[in-house]
Image: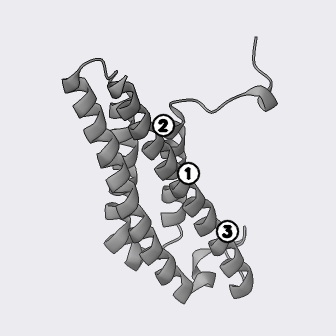
Amino acid sequence: MSVLKAKRSESKAEYINKANAIYIHTINFLSRLSARYSRLLAGTISTLAGEVVDHAEKANSIYPSDDVRRQLRERHLLEARASLMALDVHLAHCYSLMQLNPAGCFQTGSGAPVKASEAKKKLDHMAEELGELIDAENALLTNVLKSDKDRKTK
């Protein structure tokens, strides 16, 4: 039997879902870069997004039952958060570049460029959505680190 949506609580492993969402949104965001910028920036940024997912998955697969596992899990959580913060900075740089020519980031179904004002709104929405995901993931990772630390002291 499933739980009603209103009665559901946040999963302890929600940071995995957020990490995956960040990866998907990042790739979608990067697909808006022009070819000349994409060659320079997309590889590094997508690697950082992948590191967030990888380290979150690794941390989630380790149950902190002893000191060695606890330290390894903590290391992966810290690496995930460090990659997340670096990703945030790199995406801010991308956003600044895209703001130079927002109309070049979007096309209509027929391939024509979208008007600059509409493109700017779309770009702002994408950046804000990604920023909110990054903030939520940072809070989730911080909470897991705190929870693990509290579990250790009990």
* Residue 136: mark: 1
- Circle 2: element type: helix
- Circle 1: element type: helix
Q: Which of marks 3 and 2 is in front?
A: 2
Does residue 138 lie above or below 69 as drawn?
below
Disc 3 packing (10 Å; few <14; some 14–19; many ≥20): few
Q: Where is residue 83 in the image (x, y as percent from the top left)?
A: 34, 55
Q: Position of residue 5 (x, y in %)?
A: 78, 30
How far is the residue under mark 3 from the one under mark 2? 23 Å
Occupied quadrant, residue 93: bottom left
Quarter occupied by the C terminus: top left
- Circle 3: element type: helix
Disc 1 packing (10 Å; few <14; some 14–19; many ≥20): some
Residue 72 shows up from this direction: yes
Q: How is the image coloured?
A: one colour
The one of 3 and 74 positioned closer to us in this rendering: 74
Residue identifier under label 2: 16
Disc 2 packing (10 Å; few <14; some 14–19; many ≥20): many
Q: Residue furthest front?
A: 154
Occupied quadrant, residue 89: bottom left
How far is the residue under mark 2 from the one under mark 1? 12 Å
Mark sitting earlier along the chain (1/3): 3
Mark sitting earlier along the chain (2/1): 2
Q: Which of marks 1 and 3 is in front?
A: 1
Residue 113 shows up from this direction: no
Does residue 141 lie above or below 58 as drawn?
below
* Residue 125: mark: 3
